[in-house]
Amino acid sequence: MRKYFVTGLLILVPLAITLWVLNLIIGTLDQSLLLLPVSWRPEALLGMHLPGLGSILTLLIIFVTGLAARNFIGNYVVNMWESLLVRIPVVNSIYSSVKQVSDTLFSSSGNAFRKAVLIEYPRAGCWTIAFLTGVPGGDVKNHLQGDFISVYVPTTPNPTSGFFLMLPRAEAIELDMNVDEALKYIVSMGVVSPENGAKAASKAVPTLAG
């Protein structure tokens, strides 16, 4: 009986978690329907709520926004909008910070979260996986002697929270695994082991341009 129960758990638990995450994502994206007039919403037109319509609307808004911003007029409107936001106290600091992070993360030329590294944390002799996010900047780099890198250390099993660290480049080992493989390894708490890479992961992180 026990082995049948365990087998059922192994099948249903991943499925249940996957459906829960999808429901959470779709439910969040469906909030875009609130932008429509009440008379235009599915509940008014069809008499029932259809999950996923808001997700389609959200993706459509993102696509149209990106399409519009690529031409001269759209780019001008975006620049005017941003120039207005940076003049508003509080909003300025929040918007600027979020925009810089999003530009770094989603830009195809950015280096953030492009490499997984192995570092000693939280003490010498204990190792964990981190993601390369850049190099120290501003006045911080003036107080660090040597070549340092910035990394994000995600927590397990929720990688959306974690710690930001700055450490010598020589103390980080570049791993021969992509970000997806590293995330799976972290979320599974080491249960899902990535395939061994073709190259040995025994060298320090070289440069950010890679």
Image: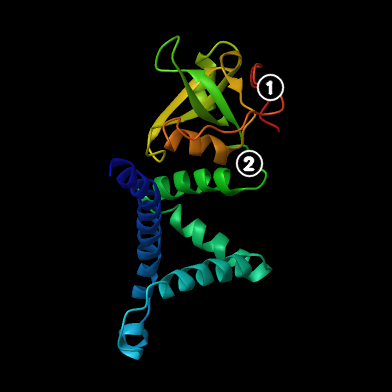
In the rendered image, which residue does mark 1 sit on? 206
Quadrant into which the C terminus falls? top right
In the rendered image, which residue does mark 2 sit on? 110
| Colouring convention used in this rendered image of the protein | rainbow
Taking the spot 39% from the left edge, 70% from the top edge, the residue there is 32
Q: Nearer the viewer, residue 68 or 57?
A: 57
Query: How far is disc 2 from disc 1 in space, using C-alphas?
Result: 16 Å
Amino acid, disc 2: Gly
Number of dots carrying numbers: 2
What kind of element bears circle 2? loop
Quadrant into which the N terminus falls? top left
Taking the spot 57% from the left edge, 18% from the top edge, the residue there is 172
User: Is there any visible trace of residue 189 in the rendered image?
Assistant: yes
Taking the spot 46% from the left edge, 69% from the top edge, the residue there is 58
Q: Looking at this rendering, what residue extends furthest in the left direction? A: 1
Q: Is residue 152 left or right of residue 49?
A: right
Whole-percent x, y for residue 177 in the image: 62, 33
Whole-percent x, y for residue 92 in the image: 42, 49
Q: Nearer the viewer, residue 9 or 57?
A: 9
Q: Nearer the viewer, residue 122 or 176?
A: 176
Whole-percent x, y for residue 154 in the image: 43, 33
Q: Earlier in the sequence, mark 2 or mark 1?
A: 2
